[in-house]
Image: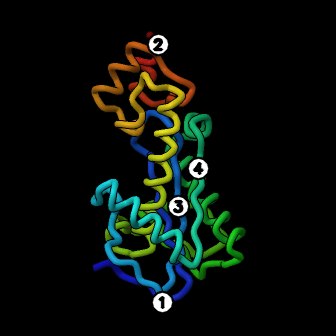
């Protein structure tokens, strides 16, 4: 059972550090203690259908939430870790601005904290321990996957709708055949090696 933390605690998580294409996304969520959401978990442990249903419930029941991105150019320029932290900063800022609600503290999945104007704590495996972080994990994953399906419509030859930009055998074969698209991360090894047909 995930821990419900008292007060206006913002959970933050990212999606898309491992892929070789597409942006990295982060979500920030403040859950409503009066409206608990059953079934929250690390997004990687849920099916796509479960994630979609929970994302809808989170977006309707949470006190506040926001999703933000760092794009491929930013990833290549500042590296994936710094881009992930940048996306987290943007998500927390968007949440506070959109909902006029400032968290008393922020809890981030992982072992690195973004620079924020609020107290922030990194929790390794937080998406499997803290409800608000699990909710952020789900929103970040569902929004990123939807974006990758949109990219598939523009670049169907890569199969983004199947692997979401991860370096699967199918993706690497397409990269070898077609070269890199504008959405590929050129600073990542597989793209650097295979991205020129």
Q: Which residue is drawn at the image coordinates 61% and 39% (left, top)?
A: 74
> Of tags 1 and 3, which is closer to the observer?
1
Q: CA distance from mark 3 to mark 4?
A: 9 Å
Q: CA distance from mark 1 to mark 2?
A: 54 Å
> Of tags 2 and 3, which is closer to the observer?
3
Q: Nearer the viewer, residue 58 or 89?
A: 58
Q: Position of residue 3 (x, y in %)?
A: 36, 81
Q: Is residue 92 left or right of residue 145?
A: right
Which label sits on residue 128? none
Asked if the residues shown at circle 2 and circle 3 are in contact, with their CB atoms under 8 angstroms apart, the answer is no
Q: Position of residue 11 (x, y in %)?
A: 49, 71
Q: Is residue 173 left or right of residue 20?
A: left
Q: CA distance from mark 1 to mark 3?
A: 21 Å
The residue where tag 1 is placed is 34
Q: Earlier in the sequence, mark 2 or mark 3?
A: 3
Secondary element at tag 2:
loop
Residue 68 placement: quadrant = bottom right
Q: Earlier in the sequence, mark 1 or mark 2?
A: 1
Which label sits on residue 27? 3
The residue where tag 4 is placed is 69
Q: Earlier in the sequence, mark 4 or mark 2?
A: 4
Q: Earlier in the sequence, mark 3 or mark 4?
A: 3
Q: CA distance from mark 2 to mark 3?
A: 34 Å
Q: Earlier in the sequence, mark 1 or mark 3?
A: 3
Q: Which residue is drawn at the image coordinates 54% and 28% (left, top)?
A: 154
Residue 161 visible (yes or no): yes
């Amino acid at each position: 059972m995930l821990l419900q933390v008292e007060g206006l605690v913002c959970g933050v998580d990212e999606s898309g550090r491992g892929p070789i294409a597409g942006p990295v996304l982060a979500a920030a969520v403040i859950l409503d203690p009066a409206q608990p959401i059953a079934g929250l978990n690390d997004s990687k442990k849920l099916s796509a259908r479960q994630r979609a249903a929970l994302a809808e419930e989170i977006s309707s029941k949470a006190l506040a939430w926001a999703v933000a991105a760092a794009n491929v150019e930013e990833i290549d320029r500042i590296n994936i870790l710094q881009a992930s932290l940048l996306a987290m900063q943007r998500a927390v800022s968007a949440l506070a601005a959109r909902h006029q609600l400032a968290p008393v503290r922020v809890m981030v999945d992982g072992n690195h904290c973004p620079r924020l104007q609020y107290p922030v704590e990194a929790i390794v495996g937080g998406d499997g321990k803290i409800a608000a972080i699990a909710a952020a994990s789900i929103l970040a994953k569902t929004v990123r996957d939807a974006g990758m399906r949109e990219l598939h419509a523009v670049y169907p030859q890569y199969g983004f709708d199947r692997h979401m930009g991860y370096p699967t055998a199918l993706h690497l074969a397409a990269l070898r055949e077609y070269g890199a698209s504008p959405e590929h991360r050129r600073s990542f090894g597989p793209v650097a090696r295979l991205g020129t047909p």
